[in-house]
Amino acid sequence: MPRIPSTQALRALESFARHGTVWQAADELNLTRSAVSHQLRLLERDLGFRLMNRVGTRVELTPQGVTYAVDVRRALSVISGSATRNAARGISGTLTVSSPPGFASSWLCPKIGGFSEAFPDVSLSLVTPRRLDDVSNPDVDIFITFGHGHQPGMAVELLKAVEFTPLCSPILLNRIDGLDAPEGLAQVTLLHLGDFQDWESWFGLAGLGVEAARTGIRFSDMNLVYSASLGAQGVAMGDEFICQQAMDAGLLVRPFDLAIRSPRSYFMIVPPEKSGNPAAAAFRGWLRGELLQG
């Protein structure tokens, strides 16, 4: 039987294939960039075929690498699913999870039934906080936050780094005969969450004056931003991760191949007094498995 590569190397490949960059894979796996690159080189050596090619300053997967990464993702998902099914035996109790509204409605809620099926004896409650990084509710066992992850004394795990890019309804694009260049955003309404910061960063990256980003409508909740964008009311600075379902359905489209790295990410945070809850451990394992599947 051929030697099976290390799990860490396989996870490095799966994360790199999903994100497209070494630094994003390193952030997700809590490793250094050099450690991820080293794991990928070791994996190539063990497999005996090339996984990556350097194209200019970028590193991309070879066709063989893409195919192998898909197989690795399936295998890791099977392993995670098996662990979840076996962990379900004998686990019961109550569990309260706090999640930002956008993450909950667009990504978590369409999948949450899978947790109840895997752990039928766990009584689950899902709540949303007033602030995206709030961890103050004493009734919550697990916090999913969108922020910087600075919570001293708590168990903090990076779930997903985030990139923002303009997203809008194809109805809007048809109405204005398309957006051929970033300058065309001057003719549409910009949709903001809270302040103008994300659009200002994107305009700066696109080489446009940031003053033009300070127009449009501001909303207090990401669900309101996405509702307006789905209704063709303007262009949102969107998170492709939680908008993937709407993009796959053709309800939202990405007019420009230009994205900004958000200084904030999604984290899973567990207070120390909640760490012994078996239902919390089960949910954490289930959530990791779902994220592997995308």
Image: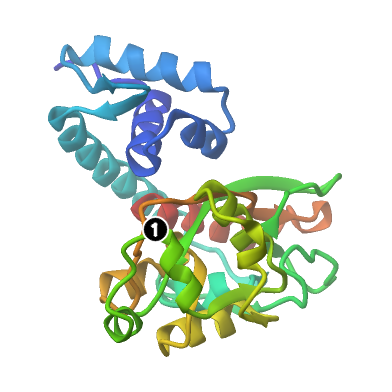
* Residue at mark 1: 85
When the figure is inspected, residue 116 is found, relative to residue 261, above or below; the finding is: below
The one of 17 and 258 positioned closer to us in this rendering: 258
Dot 1 surroundings within 10 Å: few (below 14), some, or many (20 or more)? some
Horizontally, residue 109 falls left or right of residue 252, namely right
Which residue shows up at 47% across the image and 58% down it?
286
Q: Is residue 123 visible?
A: no
- The x and y percentages for residue 264 are 66, 52
Q: Position of residue 179 (x, y in %)?
A: 34, 68
Residue 2 versus residue 189 in the image, above or below:
above
Q: For residue 225, what is the image quadrant?
A: bottom right
When the figure is inspected, residue 205 is found, relative to residue 84, above or below; the finding is: above
Depth check, front residue: 206 or 12: 206
Give the residue type at disc 1.
Arg
Q: Is residue 78 visible?
A: yes
Asked which colour scheme the image uses, the reply is rainbow
Query: Is 97 on the left or on the right of 8, as rendered?
Result: right
Instruction: Please count the marks in the image.
Output: 1
Q: Position of residue 155 (x, y in %)?
A: 74, 46
Give x and y (percent) for residue 11: 39, 33
